[in-house]
Image (cartoon, rainbow, N blue to C red):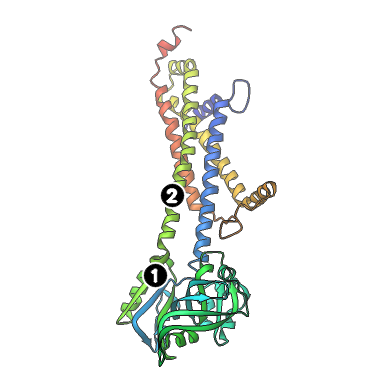
């Protein structure tokens, strides 16, 4: 770019009163600053919430589960074979029982999960989120661990005994009736998600007794894969490679896939909405260059008379858009990162002023954030392109000016 064109472009941005920028130029820069910083903050927060949901929910539910219409015999050998698959991190026996849990105060439908106690730390994050007790307490006979919300709804605490009734039918000489068992609460976990309301944990040994199967049998095998979003393909590949017959599988996408699709769609819609702010700022850039072209017609006429080329004239006004876009985007990045990194301090200050918790309805009590630098780069690139197009349009208009008509009244 010609240094003369760049110097003139910057000169035309300045205020006639000697300020660094004219009023319209300042508005364009502020518009870009607000648009870029808003996009960075909002997308970072939504990325943070998405990752928290992944950790809190997908860190608990199985990535995928291999099931059989009948019991799986000699499951320890099958588990070891599955662990040898290059894309499977770990595997363990898993029994999911639907039941009704009751206390003297209330009853609630729950999922009673039979887990391998010794391997649970490798399979889920629940051992790290124990509010009371420890996962190893399940080694006690007829014991259970429940979520904090479920404990509150039932009005129970550790040490209390609750009744679990399953859909399995037990037959005796007095007739048939649902299988029911009393279990002692030995721990309470808290993930601050809906899982706290319905998931309970028992040992795999206890689950085998409830389902009346032998110690070498299980109902399903839980897998943890190295790629969460390809869990179904990895599971299918493992079944085919190991020639496992008469089994089926399901992944987390079947139970929670719609939730994460909704989050991604919502993030896309909000990003598109915030890009409208950038579009408005680009219109301000367009207005700034148009007004400059209009007010500098005499200077353009003189330059054309002196032999300035069309390219040089275009570059003068294009340089304006370039400078405004660059300054607005750089300031937007700086403010966006500054706000994102101090977001929790800002929220705490607002909560102190309002005297209320802004996140009391959410599953976490802080604003999570995750800055995706590639995403920031795309935001800045698109914003820069939109701004440059906005500045190029009036720049092309400048070369259509007729110097004879402009200067004939001078």
C-beta proximity under 8 Å, tags 1 and 2: no
Against 263, residue 353 (above or below) is above
Is residue 21 visible to us here?
Answer: yes
Q: Which residue is mark 1?
A: 251
Residue farthest to the front? 174
Residue at mark 1 to residue at mark 2: CA–CA distance? 25 Å
Where in the figure is residue 167, as x and y percent of width and height? 41, 79
Where in the figure is residue 176, as x and y percent of width and height? 39, 86
Where in the figure is residue 32, as x and y percent of width and height? 52, 37
Q: Which residue is mark 2?
A: 268
Against 211, residue 224 (above or below) is above
Residue farthest to the top? 409
Horizontal side of residue 268 vs 190, given as left or right: left
Q: Depth check: 194 or 322 in front?
A: 194
Question: Total label count?
Answer: 2
Q: Secondary structure at mark 2?
A: helix
Local packing at callout 2 (Cα closer than 10 Å; few below 14, some 14-19, many 20+) is few
Identify the residue at horizontal 55%, vertical 70% (top origin): 150
Against 260, residue 161 (above or below) is below
Q: Secondary structure at mark 1?
A: strand
To which quarter of the image does residue 388 belong?
A: top left
Against 155, residue 357 (above or below) is above
Where in the figure is residue 118, as x and y percent of width and height? 53, 83
Q: Sequence-wise, which precedes: disc 1 or disc 2?
A: 1
Q: Which mark is residue 372?
A: none
Q: Depth check: 364 or 185 in front?
A: 185
Is residue 319 visible to us here?
Answer: no
């Amino acid at each position: 770019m010609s240094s003369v064109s760049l110097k003139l472009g910057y000169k035309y941005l300045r205020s006639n009163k000697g300020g660094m920028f004219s009023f319209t130029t300042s508005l364009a820069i502020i518009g870009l600053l607000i648009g870029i910083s808003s996009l960075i903050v909002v997308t970072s927060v939504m990325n943070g919430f998405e990752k928290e949901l992944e950790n809190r929910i997908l860190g608990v539910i199985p990535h995928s589960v291999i099931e059989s219409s009948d019991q799986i015999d000699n499951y320890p050998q099958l588990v070891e074979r599955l662990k040898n698959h290059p894309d499977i991190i770990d595997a363990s026996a898993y029994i999911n029982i639907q039941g009704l849990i009751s206390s003297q105060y209330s009853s609630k439908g729950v999922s009673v999960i039979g887990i391998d106690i010794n391997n649970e730390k490798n399979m889920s994050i629940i051992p790290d989120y124990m509010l009371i007790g420890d996962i190893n307490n399940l080694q006690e006979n007829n014991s259970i661990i429940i979520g904090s919300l479920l404990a509150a709804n039932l009005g129970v605490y550790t040490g209390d005994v609750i009744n679990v009734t399953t859909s399995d039918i037990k037959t005796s000489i007095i007739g048939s009736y649902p299988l029911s068992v009393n279990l002692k609460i030995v721990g309470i976990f808290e993930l601050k998600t809906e899982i706290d309301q319905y998931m309970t944990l028992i040992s795999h040994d206890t689950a085998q007794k409830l389902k009346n199967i032998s110690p070498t049998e299980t109902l399903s095998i839980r897998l943890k894969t190295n790629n969460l979003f390809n869990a179904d393909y990895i599971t299918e590949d493992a079944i085919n490679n190991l020639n496992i017959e008469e089994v089926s599988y399901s992944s987390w996408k079947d139970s929670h896939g719609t939730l994460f699709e909704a989050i991604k769609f919502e993030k896309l819609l909000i990003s598109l909405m915030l890009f409208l702010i950038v579009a408005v700022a680009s219109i301000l850039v367009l207005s700034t260059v148009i007004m400059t072209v209009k007010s500098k017609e005499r200077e353009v006429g003189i330059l054309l008379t002196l032999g300035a080329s069309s390219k040089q004239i275009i570059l003068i006004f294009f340089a304006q858009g370039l400078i405004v876009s660059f300054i607005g985007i750089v300031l937007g990045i700086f403010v966006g990162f500054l706000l994102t990194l101090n977001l929790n301090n800002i929220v705490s200050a607002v909560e102190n002023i309002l005297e209320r918790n802004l996140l009391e309805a959410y599953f976490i009590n802080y604003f999570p954030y995750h800055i995706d630098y590639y995403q920031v780069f795309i935001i800045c690139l698109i914003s820069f392109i939109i701004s440059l197009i906005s500045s190029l349009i009036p720049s092309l208009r400048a070369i259509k000016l007729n110097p004879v008509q402009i200067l004939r009244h001078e």
